[in-house]
Image: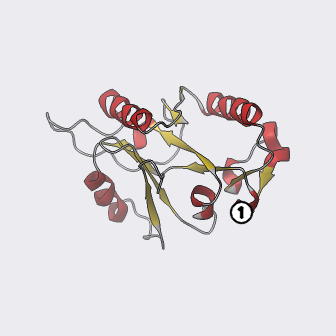
Amino acid sequence: LTLAEREPLAAPAAAPSTPDRPAAGDRDSTELFVGRLRELGVRVSVVVSLEAARQGLERLVGERGWASVACAPGLRWEGIATHWTVEARDAQFGLCAADWGVAETGSVVVRSSAEVRRGYSLVPPAVGFFVLEGCILPTVGDVLRELPSDGLALPSCVSFISGPSST
């Protein structure tokens, strides 16, 4: 799931724009990112609000009949509260808020933390990501430049998730 408009959240600073490289979160980066994901067979929903993303996820959980969803506590909400589990090994679906998307590769980048465990994106057989449009960067290099400059300590793990195996 991709959010097409930024909710009022803190986010990394935008990468500089050049004539050959679009700026972070611009329409060209978003279109390229969505296109790359679709080339990989990923189901993508572009929505304009967090509420629309939640509604889309609730529909997807219902369509697929998933009984359990694992995610960080900050992503849980009442609409499907009966589905939440803290144990990724028991979940049929994992849900993550991505730190960045990489337009050129269709990669999703997730920093691990005490709250955002790697298992949410690696263990369940199906995984979904919320990616804010303003966090879609043109290249992997742009993400690597953001890591040390965003004011946060480097995490123990930064996952770049892409390709048919989603690893």
Position of residue 159 relative to residue 105, above or below, is: below
Position of residue 158 relative to residue 6, above or below, is: below
Quadrant for the N terminus in the image? top right
- The residue lying furthest to the right in this view is 82
Residue ID at (28%, 52%): 142
Toward which corner of the image does residue 67 lie, by quadrant?
top right
Q: Depth check: give the residue in front, 147 or 30.
A: 30
Q: Depth check: give the residue in front, 65 or 71.
A: 65
Pinpoint residue 27: horizontal percent, then vertical percent. 34, 27
Toward which corner of the image does residue 130 lie, by quadrant?
top right
Residue 6 as seen in the image, left or right of residue 70: left
Position of residue 40 relative to residue 70, above or below, is: above
Q: Depth check: give the residue in front, 162 or 57.
A: 162
Residue 128 visible in the current orientation: yes
Residue 124 as seen in the image, left or right of residue 87: left
- Which residue matches tag 1? 89
Residue ID at (78%, 37%): 65
Residue ID at (73%, 30%): 63
